[in-house]
Image (spheres, grey):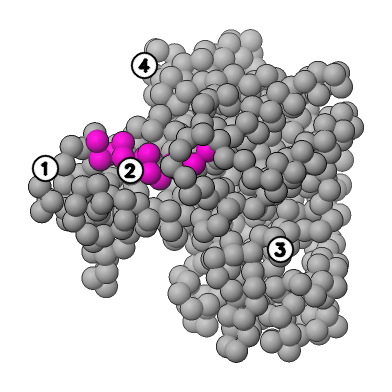
Amino acid sequence: MIEKVESVDATPSFHRGDFLFDLKSGAGFAGSLPAFLHKKITPGSARLIRADRLRRREDAFLTIAERAVFGSPSSPYLALFRRAGCEFGDLARMVSADGLEAALGRLLAEGVYLTVDEFKGRREAERGGTAAPCGPGLLRNPVTSRGVSSKSGGSRGEGAPLLLDFRFIAACAVNACLLLEAHGGSDWVKADWESPGGGALFRLLKLSRFGRRPARWFSQLDPASPGLHPRYRWSARALRWVSVVAAAPLPAVRHVPLDRPAPIVLWMRTVLEAGRTPFLFTFPSSAVKIALAAAELGLGLEGARFLVGGEPVTEARLSTIRASGAQAIPRYGSIECGPVSYGCLAPVEADDTHVNLDLYAAVQAGPEGGPPGLPPRAVFLTGLNPWTPYVLINVNLGDEAVLERRRCGCPLEAAGLGVHLRSIRSFEKLTGAGMTFMDTDVIRVLETDLPERFGGAATDYQVVEGEDGRGGPLLRLLIHPRLGPVDAVDAASFFLERIGRGSGVKRVMGLTWKAAGIVRVERRPPLPGPTGKILHLRADRRGPG
């Protein structure tokens, strides 16, 4: 989630369009929340819902395509389908004859897809002589109405207002309910620890849909912090107040900074000592901080469970979490589409996950014939739920992975989710402590801001994304030695200040990275890639040093 704000002033910036969107969505949220909170699902009903959705995958896709593409002249997909010579009748016959994934693979080869740049509206979708305007505004699902307001990503131009429909949240809750049941956790004590915003509200509401409501809501930043948009404070208070009035109270938010997670450790210990299992959604690096804090306090977390996502889930991070006695379940997804996949119970890799096939289809182009400029393992997602925030047909969100159908013998496979994603990595985003910046934001700081402040040229700076020795996130800011003396603390602070400019989501991200202390300055020349190119962003594949 990126919000473009040109001013470096930390004073909140208000836009009339955003204000009206917040006002309208806030009224709809408050009016519909009580009914949402009082309607529950059980594991039994969730199994029936998912089984029905799996049976109707092809029909669900065709219904969305007919309504939101072939019935919408402004849809960017319509021009791509017509360039491929595919009308709705052709599409229906193709899906019926070949199956959904095979049909999507053929469409991908014919140019019916969106790259992350096209999806975000940074460029038009150009295929041969066809150029279709793109962007969140043209891809927003027209049937969404009431739910959680948030911001979609947009590193050029303003982040687009995004609505997470209550029906979408309820649909995602089915899979979360069945995930916990598969792990024997239908009665786990649920909580959340992340940055304030739409993602946190989405997860709290999703977890409230089944079993007991969430017991705790921890926030890594204070929603009332100076410089943050007031919507973070308003939304937290609204959720609490409306849920209390509705006699279905959700927890009040409690600020627990990234560098002081002891209150969460103590809460987990209290739950464990009561003979129950604490279950916390957070980011992998944040779970590592909890595990390390528990060790410093001399406390074990045997039996505790984490659901982790938002950044790479690696073996180093899982090892540190396991050393505390806790276990972690990986999750892959995004604010634009929700939870794509959940952790396998018999994994072959740290981030081995099962695709929620009732909600999504996933395909790859393979080593030959893929979209120009994208790696062979780029994953293209198609949404099958009628209330997804955006219409997604073969959309790549900047991630690559191993995509395979494999027998693992775990309960998720037995439930019909036999497709796995693993080795999931971004190829164009910088991610740490659950916060993601698009490459264009980092490039601006490396090519313009840092040289203006410390001298040199764009090729004298580079960011390398990796881990420290205990699985925590580490961003190494490389500065060429030829620039002479540079104060490392000053350079790191300046980098964080510039990358976190603004009062919205970027401000949240910059403050989170600063609190996490994950930026380390190293005086060495930027590292060339295999072809000799010096990229702005590099992933350290060697692991911790």
Q: Mark 1 sits on what residue?
A: 485
Q: Nearer the viewer, residue 53 or 249?
A: 249
Mark 4 vs mark 3: give the one in front.
3
Separation of marks 1 and 3 at Cα, in angstroms: 49 Å
Callouts 2 and 3 close, C-beta under 8 Å: no
Kind of residue at badge 4: Glu
Kind of residue at badge 2: Phe
SS at mark 4?
Answer: helix
> Which of the two discs, 4 and 2, labels the residue nearer the N terminus?
4
- The picture places residue 369, in percent across and down from the top left corner, at 52, 83
Kind of residue at badge 1: Pro
Mark 1 vs mark 3: give the one in front.
1
SS at mark 3?
Answer: helix
Kind of residue at badge 3: Leu
Q: For mark 1, does the 10 Å Cα neighbourhood hold few (<14), some (14 to 19), or many (20 or more) residues?
A: few
Callouts 1 and 4 close, C-beta under 8 Å: no
> Which of the two discs, 1 and 2, labels the residue nearer the N terminus?
1
Callouts 1 and 2 close, C-beta under 8 Å: no
Taking the spot 84% from the left edge, 56% from the top edge, the residue there is: 143
SS at mark 2?
Answer: helix
